[in-house]
Amino acid sequence: MRIMLYTGKGGVGKTSVAAATALCCADLGYRTVVISTDAAHSLADSFDVEIGPEPTKLARNLWAQEVDVLHQMDQYWGLVQTWLSSVLSWRGVSDIIAEEVSVFPGMEELASLLQIVHLHDSGDYDAIVVDCAPTGETLRFLSMPEMARWYLTRIFPLERQAARVAGPVLRSMIDLPIPEDEVFEAIKNLLTQLTDMQALMTDPDLTSIRLVLNPEKMVIKEAQRTFTYLNLYDFHSDLVVSNRIIPERVEDDYFDAWKASQEKWGQLVEECFAPLPILEVPLFDQEVVGFDMLRRMAEATYGDRDPTTLFYRGKIQDVQKLDGEYRLELALPFVGKEAIDLTRAGGELVISIGNFRRNLMLPKALIDLEVKQARMEDQRLVVMFGNSGQR
């Protein structure tokens, strides 16, 4: 079983890459399902077929699904939402507003994540390919298990036994809606699923998050930020897909400037994401729509490689908070401290080793802090950040 999530800035072609990957997996004999968690679904457009809110069979070994968020929320959150709405209505909030407010921020993303867990637990598939929303929404999507657990454990502190004892009294005195056993059971099940989900999504042998980008400055910078925050949340990336590379055989003068620009920014991709493997996909001579074009894209992307392969193992960077300071670790094997030059450039830490340079996008928590110390430990660069008054 493998779970592969594809994300990137809107418009870079992540849906096409995800669809091509799923089709390739199916052609290799894996029972494969590809699902879209993007509110603006385009998976059906990519395959040029109708796709429903439940897994729809498209070809041998291949199913596709465009997640119906309202259906998922009703399935996983319906009982709790109904009770919250009744409490808010009891407080004088109108029914329509109460129904809207009773949906916590991010519940849509959570519903999509729960669907991924459901597909995994069903045992019906060998490969799950996820076409994620654009990067900002994906980060919110992936951080939801932790956030939702926080909400649920604090907003429902009422013990079930206390509710059983006090419920009839409160109902008779003030007509307060008291949660029934089914509500507590729903919350308990949801908390259990959140724990399972977190373990599932952070298992490096099972789940990989793959960044899709174009060799353009703005796209690369956003991919950098995404990569940094994925590491913060303990998610594992094993691959970068650089899409829409203009082929060398295109000799029209009109494209010379574009080719030069792509070569320049392609070097930055290497500097930012090494040692992650970077697969380059050409700009095709027609739109990537339908099975034939998706197979062309899959062949150009993976060649003879199996898309379910774990292309890179291990975390490249890690950030931890220790005694008020932050410790950033970066894997730099076979390098001595004397060969490393560190400079700050705004929100980036630039690491130079000879002719090699790495641009590391810093998390917001570190941008205003000073570099207090840098050293090598077990072939990893360790950089300590803190305020000027800290020792």
Image: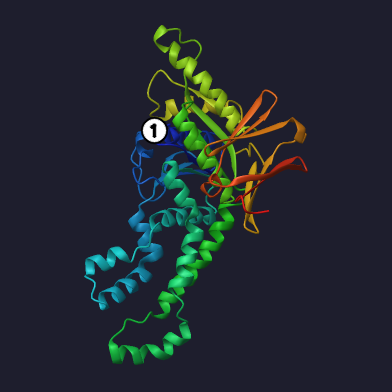
Is residue 136 visible in this depiction of the protein?
A: yes
286 up-or-down from 230: above or below: above
In terms of secondary structure, where does tag 1 sit?
A: loop
Which residue sits furthest front? Answer: 389
Residue under label 1:
11
Instruction: Please tell me which residue lies in front, 225 or 34.
Output: 225
Is residue 127 visible in this depiction of the protein?
A: no
Q: Name the quadrant containing residue 340.
A: top right
As shown in the figure, which amino acid type bears the numbered disc 1?
Gly
Residue sitting at 38 percent across and 39 percent down? 43
Q: Name the quadrant containing residue 291.
A: top left
Residue sitting at 25 percent across and 74 percent down? 89
Neighbor class of circle 1 (other Cα within 10 Å; few <14, some 14-19, many 20+) is few
Coordinates of residue 259 in the picture (x, y in percent)? 47, 15
Coordinates of residue 367 in the picture (x, y in percent)? 54, 44
Instruction: Please tell me which residue lies in front, 28 or 104.
Output: 104
Coordinates of residue 200 in the picture (x, y in percent)? 57, 54
